[in-house]
Amino acid sequence: YLWVGHNYCYAHLAGFTALFLVPGWGPQWLSYLWYLSDGRIRRKSLTWTHILHLGIFKRLWECMRLPDEDVYGEIMQQADVSALRLFEALVVTLPETLLQTYVLICTDIGIKSPASVCFVVCLLSLAWALVLYARACSLIRPGHLQMTPAAILCRLLWRVSMLGSRFAVLMLFTRIFKQWILGVIGVHWLGATFWMVSQQTDIIRSTSRWRLFNLVLGAIHIFLFLNVKYGQSRCRIAGFYLAMFLENAFLLLASSWLFSMVSWDTVAIPAAVFCSFLIGVIALVLYYRFLHPKSFEIFQSIRHRGISGACMERGSTLSLEEKVTPTFHRHATLSGGTLMDLPIQWEGWKHHHWLLIRLALKTGDVAKIWSAYGEGGLAGLMGLSEEVHSPDEPYIPRVCYLHHY
């Protein structure tokens, strides 16, 4: 607004930008509730931290101060903050990035304006949130090594390139066809939702919540790929990005045809979009070939069985003991039974750590989760304390969520 000389059109856009603080209350409220469920005492300082939208920054600071010996607490704290940061990025940063892209492409403000800086920062923030979430899932998931710095940078390049090209294509189409972009988004949302339904994920068991879960994932897949299906994902990734490439090409071609004359836009912008998408594909292939925690297994399975056979593989050759130090198992175990013996009325099933574990392993099947972690691993992540009870007494597990705050 100030850059272009008090144009009221940009004043409206600035006010619209401020409205994105409203959905930002969602992640802050969820973070506050998670603190309370973890046993944090309700204090005014905790309340005001979240009112000022500093709850996630507080969690990041606490992650850096956790003692090294508290492996369980460190893993779940990182899972908490990465999930909340991803939630905030999807409801705040993603629409903010769309708006900044619209300002750059559909108005005459120019690429040298502050909107360019806002676009770059928002794009990096969204991509970084996705990388942090993937890293946290890798920490929770047995059979996966920790991400190296090279893997993190490769994933960041993949996300930035793919998201940048996607946002640019949608706004280029909006520049010509205006409100018709809503139809394109609606059709993509419908198709992505049916695709999610066809995968029959079992992370959510309630029918109504499962439907809502698929609707939300369908909306997310308008812009990016987020894997929530148990098993190998390379076929789903290849199919998703092939469909996105064809859709981007169609939208870009339709937009370019209607330019009135040959100009810089007709050549430079489409070329930049395709180059960005190509860079994302290269980063994706490099990550899965050399930097993925199971990249050697992926390469060997594709080499010997082909990609269709490799997509049917399950499991991993790595165990939880090979992933972390042996002290990982000394914190908590279950006595008198397994986690599958817990009653359905147990409140721990409703705890957010159980949701994060299901999202990380991409399944809600307790038998699969138990077999993946083995004795003691899942009990520690869920905060179950080791206890001794008489065989004549009913086994009622106690839950203690102990974190170092």
Image (spheres, rainbow, N blue to C red):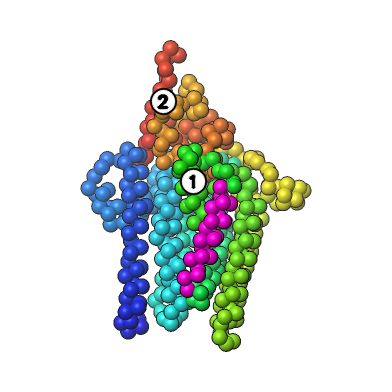
Residue 337 x %, y %: 50, 23
Find disc 1 in the rendering and name its residue: 211
Q: What is the crowding at mark 2: few (fewer than 14 residues within 10 Å), some, or many (at least 20)?
A: many
Range of residues picked out in magenta: 178-197
Q: What type is the residue that disc 2 sits on?
A: Pro
Find disc 2 in the rendering and name its residue: 397
SS under mark 1: helix
Residue 159 x %, y %: 54, 61
95 part of magenta stretch: no
Relative to 129, does residue 272 appear above or below in the rendering?
below
Residue placed most toward the observer, 380 or 243: 243
Comes first in the chain, label 2 or label 1 = 1
Q: Quadrant of the C terminus?
A: top left
Residue 235 x %, y %: 66, 52
Residue farthest to the top, as pictured: 392
Q: What type is the residue that disc 1 sits on?
A: Arg
Q: Main secondary structure of the magenta part?
A: helix
Q: CA distance from mark 2 to mark 1?
A: 32 Å
